[in-house]
């Protein structure tokens, strides 16, 4: 096909769709504990309140999430699993689903074939209607784990949906309806999270080990300032759509 195919508009504009129908289940795939809450905590809380089962998959152990050079990284990884489970409980409430961990070393995640197979197996087991993940095509993204986790979400879906991939799983194939990529290079979909910003902030606050390094908050005043930055950000994202608060994504609906 010619590269200048006129069938595809080339303009990059503001988001063009708002609010997917509430899915029966969703799987959010993040590189580190807390990435899911930053990327899509509001929409997960909204969907859970409407009856959607919310699953989490965290690819790395988060063992480098500290500025303390003398930290016990094994203890930190254990603590971050506990924090992730608490964040998932706060977002999902009665509809909190599973929290899975691939356990890769923080900073060393790769989208290799074996890891893709593990992600595809989890998609086949949990059978989510919607998958959410990092946008691996975000320009100038520095953190390699975010890139790799984004590719694992995309590649994992392709492997999970096609019956001849990873036949050794012994599981039926599963094709999700849609994929939402957060921190998107070209966002084209907004989710109204008005009324669910507090739930997102409560889930972020479960990641106490990250207050200093990620949220730049070592006291109550700084934590309040962090929360205000998030509120302002979601408000800014919603304004073009007359929404009080929004999270925006690249929507890939034809899987
Ligand atoms: Zn991260």
Image (cartoon, grey):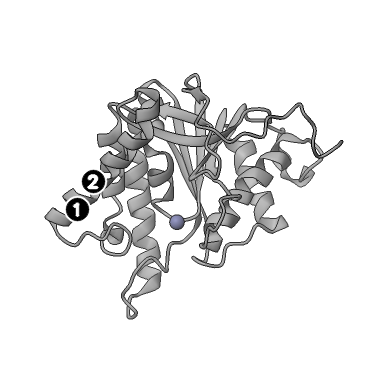
Query: Is 8 in front, or is 69?
Result: 8
Tell me the tag on residue 205: none
Query: Is 39 in front, or is 209?
Result: 39
User: Measured along the vertical axis of the image, is residue 73 above or below residue 27?
Assistant: below
Q: Is residue 139 left or right of residue 40?
A: right
* Residue 135 drawn at (x, y percent): 56, 46
Q: What crowding class fits label 2: few (fewer than 14 Cα within 10 Å), some (14-19), or many (20 or more)?
A: many
- Residue named by callout 2: 227
Query: Residue, x 26% and y 61% (percent of image)?
Result: 216
Tell me the tag on residue 223: 1
* Residue 187 drawn at (x, y percent): 52, 37
Tell me the SS state at disc 1.
Answer: helix
Query: Residue, x 43% and y 28% (percent of image)?
Result: 191
* Ligand 1 image position (quadrant): bottom left
Q: Is residue 161 left or right of residue 71?
A: right
* Residue 36 drawn at (x, y percent): 43, 45
* Residue 93 drawn at (x, y percent): 32, 32
Q: Is residue 170 left or right of residue 100?
A: right
* Quadrant in the picture for residue 42: top left
Query: Residue, x 33% and y 52% (percent of image)?
Result: 83
User: Measured along the vertical axis of the image, is residue 222 above or below residue 92?
Assistant: below
**Callout 2 touching callout 1 (CB < 8 Å):** yes
Query: Is 198 in front, or is 93?
Result: 198
């Amino acid at each position: 096909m010619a590269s200048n195919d006129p069938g595809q508009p080339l303009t990059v504009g503001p988001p063009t769709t708002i609010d997917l129908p509430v899915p029966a289940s969703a799987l959010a795939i993040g590189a580190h504990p807390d990435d899911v809450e930053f990327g899509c905590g509001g929409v997960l809380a909204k969907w859970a309140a409407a009856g959607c089962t919310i699953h989490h998959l965290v690819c790395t152990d988060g063992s480098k999430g500290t500025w303390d050079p003398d930290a016990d990284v094994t203890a930190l990884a254990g603590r971050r699993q506990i924090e992730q489970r608490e964040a998932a409980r706060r977002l999902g409430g009665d509809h909190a689903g599973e929290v899975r961990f691939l356990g890769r070393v923080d900073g060393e995640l790769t989208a290799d074939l074996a890891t893709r197979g593990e992600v595809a197996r989890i998609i086949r087991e949990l059978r989510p209607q919607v998958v959410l993940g990092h946008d691996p095509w975000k320009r100038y993204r520095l953190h390699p784990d975010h890139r790799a986790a984004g590719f694992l979400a995309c590649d994992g879906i392709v492997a999970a949906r096609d019956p001849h991939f990873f036949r050794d799983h012994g599981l039926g194939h599963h094709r999700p309806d849609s994929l939402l990529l957060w921190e998107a290079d070209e966002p084209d979909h907004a989710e109204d999270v008005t009324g669910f910003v507090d739930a997102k902030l409560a889930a972020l606050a479960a990641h106490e080990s990250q207050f200093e390094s990620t949220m730049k908050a070592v006291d109550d005043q700084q934590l309040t300032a962090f929360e205000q930055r998030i509120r302002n950000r979601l408000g800014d994202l919603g304004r073009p759509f007359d929404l009080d608060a929004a999270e925006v994504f690249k929507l890939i609906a034809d899987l």
